């Protein structure tokens, strides 16, 4: 485990609210592991294990996020794309970099440095991960949501990050969140240009970043230079609870049972949570017995098998 150090992510920690979007600052832009040559080497190691996601710059804000690599393919290897990123017309993400021993140390260094500050408000950080995005000029990350809390830190180049509140039901409905948590389906998460005026908008350069709570919708637009960005992500008790409530609502809706919105009744939410927890545990155990992969959400790291 890395040594606990001063927080490597700066924000108003005293007033930190785990479910509120906020700007952050950081000191990682000069880190050796985040320079282009090192990222090319990492991309070779991760591509061998299928841990690269890429699409062409022709993707737009309204491209369905899950299908972007199929609809707008980038046929070059990850290393070739990174070597000529200025002209590659591509978006490339190195996924779950904590599965690489060298980069796991970086994930630990950063998340260990903020863990006590996070957990003072949002207990039990787990499933920690790192994601590095290398992007050609004028390229978009389509509108979408993710399950993890996310510190998104700009390393090189400039981009505009649009983030919406995680409870903004005009932008992403409760039904869309239910489907996402129940089936990892983003089909009801659909971009409309009119959403822009409701967004928190961050114009970021090296040293800047943002905190995006779990399921805060987001859209990213890169400026006129290539961009490198790193995200540090994790689950907590509150993200697992919120996910479970939407998961239960999604599955009950399939059976014709419509529950009120998550957050409308604390008591009902608590009853649903208590009821759904053992059901989901049983289903996951059955899946494991059948030899199917099950994410261990309370594990220290996402997608990493330790020897
Ligand atoms: Fe995302």
Image (cartoon, rainbow, N blue to C red):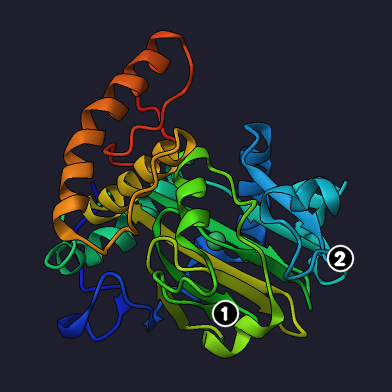
Give residue 74's position: percent from left, percent from top. Answer: 85, 51
- Residue 29 at least partly seen: yes
Closest to the observer, 142 or 106: 142
Label 2 Cα neighbours within 10 Å, binned few <14 / some 14-19 / many ≥20: some
- Is 155 on the left or on the right of 127, as rendered? right
Seen at 61% across and 48% down, the residue is 42
Q: Quadrant of the C terminus?
A: top left
- Reading the image, the residue beneath label 2 is 58
- Is 229 on the left or on the right of 259, as rendered? right
Seen at 23% across and 46% down, the residue is 1
- Reading the image, the residue beneath label 1 is 161
Label 1: element kind: strand
Tally of marks: 2
Give residue 102's position: percent from left, percent from top. Answer: 45, 46
Q: Can you tell me whether the CB of the residue at mark 1 lies under 8 Å from the nearest atom of ligand 1?
A: no
Q: Can you tell me whether the CB of the residue at mark 2 lies under 8 Å from the nearest atom of ligand 1?
A: no
Closest to the observer, 204 or 18: 18
Q: CA distance from mark 1 to mark 2?
A: 18 Å
Seen at 61% across and 72% down, the residue is 219
- Is 104 on the left or on the right of 140, as rendered? left
Give residue 189's position: percent from left, percent from top. Answer: 61, 60
Label 2: element kind: loop
Closest to the observer, 136 or 271: 271
- Residue 73 at least partly seen: no
Seen at 20% across and 35% down, the residue is 275
Question: Does label 1 or label 2 sit earlier along the sequence?
Answer: 2
Image quadrant of residue 38?
Answer: bottom right
State which image quarter holds ligand 1.
bottom right
Label 1 Cα neighbours within 10 Å, binned few <14 / some 14-19 / many ≥20: many
């Amino acid at each position: 485990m890395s040594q606990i150090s001063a927080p490597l992510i700066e924000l108003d920690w005293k007033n930190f609210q785990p479910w509120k979007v906020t700007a952050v600052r950081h000191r990682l832009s000069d880190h050796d592991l985040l320079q282009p040559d090192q990222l090319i080497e990492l991309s070779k190691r991760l591509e061998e294990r299928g841990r690269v996601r890429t699409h062409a710059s022709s993707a737009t804000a309204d491209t369905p996020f899950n299908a972007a690599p199929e609809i707008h393919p980038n046929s070059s290897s990850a290393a070739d794309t990174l070597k000529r990123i200025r002209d590659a017309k591509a978006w490339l993400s190195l996924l779950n970099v904590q599965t690489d021993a060298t980069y796991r140390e970086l994930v630990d260094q950063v998340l260990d440095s903020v863990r006590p500050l996070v957990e003072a408000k949002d207990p039990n950080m787990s499933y920690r991960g790192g994601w590095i995005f290398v992007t050609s000029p004028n390229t978009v990350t389509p509108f979408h949501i993710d399950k993890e809390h996310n510190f998104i830190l700009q390393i090189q180049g400039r981009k505009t990050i649009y983030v919406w509140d995680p409870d903004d039901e005009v932008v992403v409905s409760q039904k869309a969140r239910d489907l996402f948590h129940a089936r990892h389906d983003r089909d009801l998460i659909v971009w409309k240009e009119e959403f822009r005026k409701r967004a928190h908008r961050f114009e970021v350069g090296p040293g800047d970043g943002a905190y995006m709570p779990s399921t805060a919708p987001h859209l990213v637009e890169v400026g006129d230079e290539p961009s490198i960005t790193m995200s540090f992500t994790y689950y907590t008790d509150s993200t697992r609870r919120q996910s479970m409530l939407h998961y239960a609502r999604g599955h009950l809706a399939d059976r014709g049972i419509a529950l009120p919105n998550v957050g409308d009744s604390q008591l009902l939410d608590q009853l649903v949570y208590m009821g759904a927890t053992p059901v989901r545990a049983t289903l996951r155990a059955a899946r494991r017995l059948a030899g199917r992969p099950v994410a261990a959400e309370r594990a220290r790291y996402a997608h990493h098998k330790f020897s």
